[in-house]
Image (tube, helix red, strand yellow):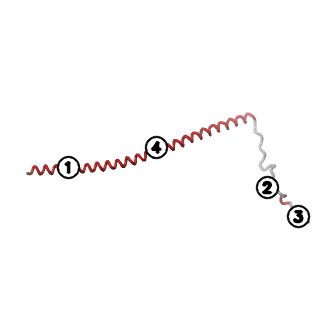
Amino acid sequence: GDAGRSLGSELADQRLRAEQLLLREERRAAELAGRAEEVESALEAGRREAQELSEEKRSLAARCGALHRENERIQRVGKAQALAGPPPAPPPPGGTSSSPLLVGGGAGAPRFSAA
């Protein structure tokens, strides 16, 4: 009778709601799986970048160390020179070296041979 039909439609409604809920949950699960993949690959890229940066940092640290030692050496040499007295004066620029313009007789040479 009447009660049986309403119970049947009640069950049908519940089943429909359950199916919709299931579909919604499955869609959400698929979205999450896709998002998880994106995050995973971003994480992988981040790890690679961190690895590269840490290698770069190591080589920069090594270069800094070398420059630091070189700097200390230069300072020691400078102190030693300061203690030894002033360095000899460098020759004035363009001093004794003949300029290339004067090589080969220059402007005063005759342009023809005397017969």
Position of 7 with respect to 25 (left or right) is left
The quadrant where residue 77 appears:
top right
Residue closest to the eye, 54 or 110: 54
Front tag of 2 and 1 = 1
Q: CA distance from mark 1 to mark 3?
A: 122 Å
Query: Is disc 2 placed on a helix, strand or loop?
Result: helix
Callout 4 amino acid = Arg
Q: CA distance from mark 2 to mark 1?
A: 104 Å
Callout 1 amino acid = Arg
Taking the spot 71% from the left edge, 34% from the top edge, the residue there is 80
The local crowd at label 1, few if under 14, some if 14 to 19, many if 20 or more residues have their Cα within 10 Å, is few
Q: Is residue 6 above or below residue 81?
A: below
The local crowd at label 4, few if under 14, some if 14 to 19, many if 20 or more residues have their Cα within 10 Å, is few
Q: Is residue 34 above or below residue 87?
A: below
Q: CA distance from mark 3 to mark 4?
A: 82 Å
Callout 2 amino acid = Pro
Residue at the farthest bottom position: 115
The local crowd at label 2, few if under 14, some if 14 to 19, many if 20 or more residues have their Cα within 10 Å, is few
Query: Is disc 1 placed on a helix, strand or loop?
Result: helix
Kindly check if marks 4 and 1 are in contact, taking CB atoms under 8 A apart as contact. Answer: no
Task: Indicate which disc residue 15 carries.
Answer: 1
Task: Indicate which disc residue 47 carries.
Answer: 4
Residue that mark 3 sits on? 113
